[in-house]
Image (tube, rainbow, N blue to C red):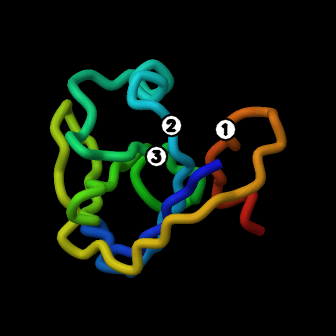
Amino acid sequence: MDTCQFTYVSLRDGIQRTALGVEQAWEVLCAKLHRDGPGLPNGKHYFTISVDGPQLFAVDTESDSVYYHECGVWCSYVTARDIIIGTIPDDGTGCPPRATADSQQ
C-alpha cells in the first residue's frame, strides 16, 4: 500500500508531530469519513493511520504541498516538511485502522 508521512507543527499546542497515511481514493475517504466536495486537484489522498495528524490529508503531486480537509475546503499545512512517500505491505485485509494513544504503549 502506498503511504505518505510528513512532519508538522500542531496549531493546537505548538508541538512538532508526524502523521502517516495510507493512500485511498477520494470517493472512499468521502464515504468513510462523511466528507463532501471535490478531491484536491493534482492530489493523492491519504487516510491517517498514525495517532497524530488529521483524519485525512492530501499531497499535491506537482508542488509536494500537504493539505488537510476541513468543512469542505482544502487548507495548506504551512509547517509541513520531511514528506516521505513509501509503501507498507498489503496483507489483503484492506486499509489498516487508525492508531490510538493506547495502541502505542
Instruction: From the top left corner, tell me how far across and down residue 55 is, in percent.
Output: 44, 44
Circle 2 packing at 10 Å, graded few (<14), some (14-19), many (20+), is some
The numbered mark at residue 53 is: none
With 73 as the anchor, is 27 left or right in this view? right
Q: Say whether disc 2 or disc 1 marks the residue closer to the N-terminus.
A: 2
Residue wearing tag 2: 24
Residue toward you, 39 or 70: 39
Determine the residue positioned at 16% across, 38% down.
Answer: 73
The answer to whether residue 88 is left or right of residue 29 is: right
Q: Position of residue 10 (x, y in %)?
A: 32, 70
* Residue pointed to by mark 1: 95
Q: Amino acid at mark 1?
A: Cys
Q: CA distance from mark 3 to mark 1?
A: 10 Å
Q: Give the labeled residue for mark 3.
A: 46
Classify the position of the C terminus by image quarter.
bottom right
Regarding mark 1 in the picture, which secondary structure is present there?
loop
